[in-house]
Image: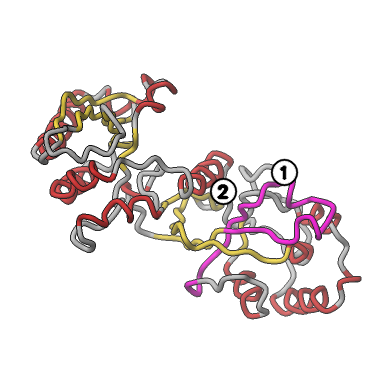
Amino acid sequence: MSPDTPTNAEPPRPTTAQLRAKLEQLAAEPSARRGVAGIVDNRWEQGSVVDAETLRVLAELGLLARQPPRENAIGVILTQSCDIVNGSYDAEPEVELWLAHVTDRPEPQYFALKNPRRLHLEANTPTGACHLEINGHLRTSMPRWTLEALRPDTILFLAKPHVDLLLDFLVNRFRRPAFPNAFNQRRTSAIRKIETTLKRHAKEIYRLYVKLNTFDELVNDGAQYVVELYLLVSQEHFAVDQIRHTLDQATAKIAGLLDSCAGIVVDDYHVVPDISVRLSDLRRWTPWDTAEFSVGEVPAPFVSAVVRDG
């Protein structure tokens, strides 16, 4: 079954009391576990959602490695589908999940992997779309055998593209390009104003990319980082003259702010439609992640450590 659509022909879901009793039985009597057949029957896969009430019962029974941070938290399964239905509980003893909650205030600066620590992700319900807020550090796990007693949420579910986006968010937690320390220190004075400009146009902007002339640590005051900026936007927004003109002005402002930093020279800047970007471009550009670090909260020499810390 694909997470794009919920299943329609399901037996009645167990009550909270029945769910608790079943989990307690499976915990106390491993011989009562059916194994992978029970998980398959319940139709679990990567991207399936554990509803708030079920997550609460799991937490109360001590079956979550990390307690949910809020009462209405839900879980999104991260474990690969093939591992979820692995035939051995010894080989795959746990499933991993991301703790999330529904937000009624989705913010564009948290869409599309713009922020490395927070993601606002679209989800589906029978009455229309909603948005989940996911914080990068709020992951947990639970014994895989619990899935024999649980069923995925069929009221709130993620479509396949949004599951893929969530997985990209996870990968970016560990494999995010980092700028040289010296570049980070030099750009510190412009960070706050650049972030403000990006947030002002967050609905139209996918991401700001930076192309550096070198990733060496330039410790000589006379050596300069030469920069090209690429503001990536949707083709839909790029095609509207007024929006493109506004984004040209925003990019020029960002370029001016960065160029004012000692030891940084902005050679050129561009507003680029997403359909024109090639894979080879992305290999040469480094994303400027919004809210990479909080300027003013740490001394300049330690800014780079915060960036690399993920």
Structural crowding at the residue carrying mark 1, measured as other residues with C-alpha within 10 Å and reported as few (<14), some (14–19) or many (≥20): few
Quarter in which the N terminus is drawn: top right
110 above or below 218? below
Front in this rendered view, residue 15 or 199: 199
- Provide residue 169's location: percent of width, then percent of height: 47, 47
State the residue position of label 2. 158
Residue 28's disc is: none
64 above or below 96? below
State the SS at label 2. Answer: loop
The answer to which of marks 2 and 1 sits earlier in the sequence is 1
Pointer 2 with pointer 1, Cβ within 8 A: no
State the residue position of label 1. 1
Q: Residue at x 42, y 43 (%)?
A: 176
87 magenta-colored? yes
89 magenta-colored? yes
Q: CA distance from mark 2 to mark 1?
A: 12 Å
Q: Residue at x 64, y 53 (%)?
A: 48
Horizontal side, residue 266 vs residue 94: left or right: left
- Provide residue 261's location: percent of width, then percent of height: 11, 41
- Provide residue 138's location: percent of width, then percent of height: 49, 63
Q: Residue at x 14, y 46 (%)?
A: 190
State the SS at label 1. Answer: loop
Front in this rendered view, residue 206 or 304: 304
Give the amino acid type for the residue marked by disc 2 in the picture: Leu
97 above or below 241? below
Front in this rendered view, residue 104 or 137: 137
Horizontal side, residue 270 vs residue 13: left or right: left
Horizontal side, residue 302 vs residue 178: left or right: left
Residues shaded magenta: 69-97
Give the amino acid type for the residue marked by disc 1 in the picture: Met
- Provide residue 115's location: percent of width, then percent of height: 36, 49
Residue 288: which quarter of the image? top left
